[in-house]
Image (tube, rainbow, N blue to C red):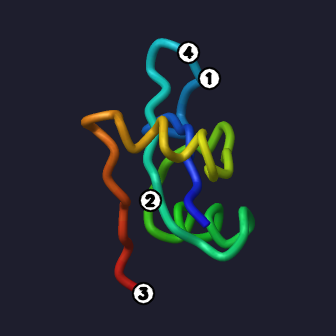
Amino acid sequence: MIYKVYYQETKQRNPQRETTQSLYLEAETEVDARVLVEDNTEYNIEFIEPLEGNFLDYEKENPEFQLTEFNK
């Protein structure tokens, strides 16, 4: 399944909507998606959203849509 992960680049300050970023990744479960991001970045994860059906189709229309892959 594809997940959209909302995050802040640092854990040092409180999250602000204006600085929230996102990435897309493929994982078996939401827990797996969280572990992938936590093990490979210093990001402060705010929210993880599963994408499927029309929601995934809509996100794919975004020119910035690109799946993030981490080396295992």
State the CA–CA distance, disc 3 to disc 1. Answer: 30 Å
State the CA–CA distance, disc 2 to disc 3. Answer: 13 Å
Q: Is residue 24 above or below residue 70?
A: above
Q: Which residue is mark 4?
A: 17
Residue with the most extreme top position: 18
Q: Crowdedness of circle 4 by 10 Å Cα count: few (<14), some, many (20+)?
A: few
Q: Which residue is mark 1?
A: 14
Q: Amino acid at mark 4?
A: Arg
SS label for mark 1: loop
Q: Which residue is mark 3?
A: 72
Quarter containing the C terminus:
bottom left
Q: Crowdedness of circle 3 by 10 Å Cα count: few (<14), some, many (20+)?
A: few
1 or 2: tag closer to the N-terminus: 1
Q: Crowdedness of circle 2 by 10 Å Cα count: few (<14), some, many (20+)?
A: few
State the CA–CA distance, disc 4 to disc 3. Answer: 31 Å
Residue with the most extreme bottom position: 72
